[in-house]
Amino acid sequence: MKLRFLLAALPFIGIYSGGTLAASTPLLFGLPFLLVWNLFWMAATAAILAFIYYLDSRDEAAHASERTGDGQ
C-alpha cells in the first residue's frame, strides 16, 4: 500500500522540481528544457498511474465473482 502512495507522489515531485533544474535555459532537441521536462513527466505520469492501477487489488473479488457467476 505504501508503494502506491510513493509512486503516486513521484509525478508531483517530478513536475514541480523541474524549475529548479533549469537555472539557465538550455535547449534539448531544439526545445526549451522545461517543455521537454513537462512532456517527459506527462508520459511518466501516465505510465506510473497505469502501474498503480495494475497493482490495485481492490476489484479482484468482484472480478472473481463475475467470472464464476456468483455476483448476486
Image (cartoon, grey):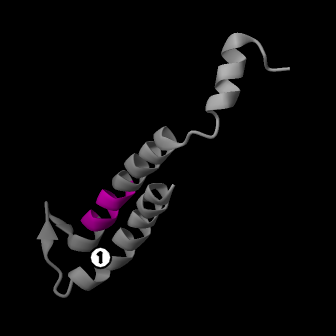
Main SS category, magenta section = helix
Indicate whether 58 appears above or below 71: below
In the image, the segment drawn in magenta is: 36-42
Q: Quadrant of the C terminus?
A: top right
Q: Residue 38: within the magenta? A: yes
Residue drawn at x 47%, y 55% is: 4
Q: Residue 20: within the magenta? A: no
Image quadrant in which you'd find residue 12: bottom left
Q: Is residue 28 left or right of residue 5?
A: left
Q: Position of residue 22 (x, y in %)?
A: 21, 81
Q: Position of residue 17 (x, y in %)?
A: 32, 78
Q: Which residue is mark 1?
A: 18
- Find numbered disc 1 in the image and state the secondary structure of the residue it sits on: helix
Image quadrant in which you'd find residue 3: bottom left
Q: Residues within 10 Å of mark 1 (few under 14, many from 20)?
A: some
Q: Position of residue 36 (x, y in %)?
A: 25, 64
Image quadrant in which you'd find residue 7: bottom left
Indicate whether 7 appears above or below 54: below
